[in-house]
Amino acid sequence: MNSSATLTDRYPTRLPEAGAVMDRPDPVVWPGRDGPWDDEAVNFFGDNGYRTVEDVLDTPDLAQVRSEIDRLATELGDDERLIRESSNGDVRSIFSVHTLSTEIARIIARDDVAGVARQLLGDDVYVHQSRVNLKPGFAGGPFYWHSDFETWHAEDGMPTPRAVSVSLALTPNTRFNGPLMILPGSHRRFVPCVGETPGDYHRESLKSYRPPFGTPEESDIAAMAQQYGITQVTGGAGSALYFDCNCLHASAGNISPFPRSNLFVVFNAVSNALEEPFAARSRRPDYLAAR
């Protein structure tokens, strides 16, 4: 635990009892960089905490990424970067895909992906985490409500929410196959979570749809859903969802026959480099939090 930083920690979490939801003291859109988006697009992101764009990946891009995922799922075997569903053993996620595939790394580095992150964060960026999330038809598990920044702050030592996530749809994301749900506007509030972070836990937590730590109180989720509403994010294969790291979001399980797969990458500002964890005993592996 980063005991030296607790006195100046502006985002205290993993508390012994429920704490108050607080206003975010840091910007959402940081000044200092031009980029591919116009002012209207940037302002929409700042107000809502997310923005979607269709056709960021074209047909050859999609075929290449899907081929790479199939290759990795076969080659990685019992590698710790490959996470399986606890229910049936199907592949749930593959982490650090940009280090395992030059084709995926090429796509992530493009101006309409990394360039947008540089524009929104006002800084050079690096990949904090990348992964593929797979939700096969009839079997894809849910992901419970959470703020990514809460986890990255508590467990990885990310100082401020100066990070942007990009989710690239590899299959259509429809209202039937477990798409992402976002509370638009929730990115402007920080929701502390209750419970001490356990020690050697990260493998099991990645398999659980609702870990016993790092998840907001149901009362906080209900109040914020009442205030902000819930947006279900859908889009065609090749579409992109850009969202602030502090948005509250979740996704239901996929019991439709149609798979839902996404390439997910987190860009962190270089000036926001990780410190020691603020509320955990040790660092997580590099494939979860690159340093």
Image (tube, rainbow, N blue to C red):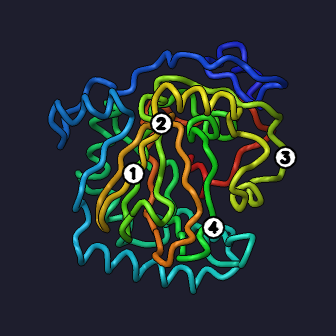
Q: What is the number of the mark on residue 125? A: none
**Precedes in sequence: disc 1 or disc 4:** 4
Q: Name which residue type carries label 2.
A: Leu
Q: What is the number of the mark on residue 183? A: 2
What is the C-alpha distance between the residues marked 4 and 3? 19 Å
Image position of 128 (left or right of 269): right
**Precedes in sequence: disc 4 or disc 3:** 4
Image position of 280 (left or right of 142): right
Q: Residues within 10 Å of mark 3 (few under 14, many from 20)?
A: few
Q: Name which residue type carries label 1.
A: Val
The residue mark sitting in front, 2 or 4, is: 2
Q: Name which residue type carries label 4.
A: Arg
Q: Name which residue type carries label 3.
A: Gly
Q: Which residue bears the numbered disc 3?
A: 199
Depicted 9 relative to depicted 201: above or below: above
Q: Which quarter of the figure is the N terminus placed in?
A: top right
Q: How crowded is mark 2: few (under 14 residues within 10 Å), some or many (20 or more)?
A: many
Give percent across and percent down for residue 289.
59, 49
The residue mark sitting in front, 2 or 3, is: 2
Q: Which residue bears the numbered disc 4?
A: 81
Image position of 272 (left or right of 61): right
The residue mark sitting in front, 3 or 1, is: 1
What is the C-alpha distance between the residues marked 2 and 3? 30 Å
Q: State if disc 3 and disc 2 touch (CB < 8 Å).
A: no
Q: Which residue bears the numbered disc 1?
A: 233
What is the C-alpha distance between the residues marked 3 and 1? 34 Å
Depicted 198 relative to depicted 273: above or below: below
Which element is circle 2 on?
loop
**Precedes in sequence: disc 2 or disc 4:** 4
Give percent across and percent down for residue 216.
68, 34
